[in-house]
Image (cartoon, rainbow, N blue to C red):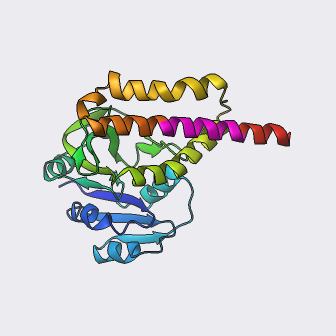
Amino acid sequence: MGKVSVTIIVLNEEHNLPDCLESVRWADEVIVSDTGSTDATAEICRAYGAKVYSDSWLGFGAQKNLCADRARNAWVLNLDADERVTPELKDEIINAASNDAKAGYFIARKNYFGSRWIRRCGWYPDYNLRLYRKDKGRFSDRHVHEAVSVSGPTGRLAGPMIHQTYKDVSDYLARMQRYSTLAAQEMLKEGRRAGVSDLLLRPPFTFLKMYVLRGGFLEGTNGMILSYLYASYTLAKYAKLWELRRGVCKGL
């Protein structure tokens, strides 16, 4: 049987971790990078037999690479605390890790908004490369929206991963504040700019893309709210980029 190391980065995730860790009890090892939790996160992880490391925050990509570097197995499965591995996905992961036919595998995610599985808005199947050979894959060093790049062929697993994306609107808005700031900082680092056209056109286009082009209207009120929330995120990150650019220019 192929052995798999599960890697998770966490910060105050006591409410999510029991279900997440329960879903990977089959894994050979679980490695957790705790970046300053003040709740029972570390204690819960240790209770499930995970190896817990207290680390400074490096950014999402670098943090996940740090976790993978500590793995003792050839195959790494990267999870977020709000994700769960289904039984059918577990079997596929074990089979995939038992051979070297691929360098990595994309996994579909069933994303939930509250208690509702959102099938449209571009939220499903939402394939992400999460299972990869340690010697073949590496996360990008982006502070947000990081992804694994692998050298070699990839495949797709049929079993889905459950993703408890947002508990409610308040949860989305709280996280939007952090993610929009990180996204703006990343865009600034890349030399991007935010003009009037970006602020004026990108938010409504985001809404139309999710609500109309990707079928969000078929999700009822949930689809409309999600589309508006994503539009507000788009406005926030470009408005913050505009502010950052002004600060940079003033400092020259």
Locate residue 68 relative to residue 182 in the image: left or right. left
Residue nearest the viewer, comparing 82 with 46: 82
Residue nearest the viewer, comparing 15 with 65: 15
Residue 170 drawn in magenta: no
Residue 19, located in which quarter of the rendered image? bottom left
User: Total number of numbered labels?
Assistant: 0
Q: Is residue 163 above or below residue 200?
A: below
Q: What secondary structure characterizes most of the magenta part?
A: helix
Residue in view at x 27 percent, y 61 percent: 20
Work out which quarter of the rendered image holds the N terminus and state it: bottom left
Q: Position of residue 239 (x, y in %)?
A: 62, 37
Q: Is residue 80 above or below residue 15?
A: above
Tell me, yes or no, if residue 142 can be seen here: no
Q: Residue furthest right?
A: 252
Locate residue 205 relative to residue 250 in the image: left or right. left
Q: Position of residue 231 (x, y in %)?
A: 47, 34
Q: Position of residue 101 (x, y in %)?
A: 25, 37
Tell me, yes or no, if residue 243 can be seen here: yes
Find the magenta span and give its range: 232-244
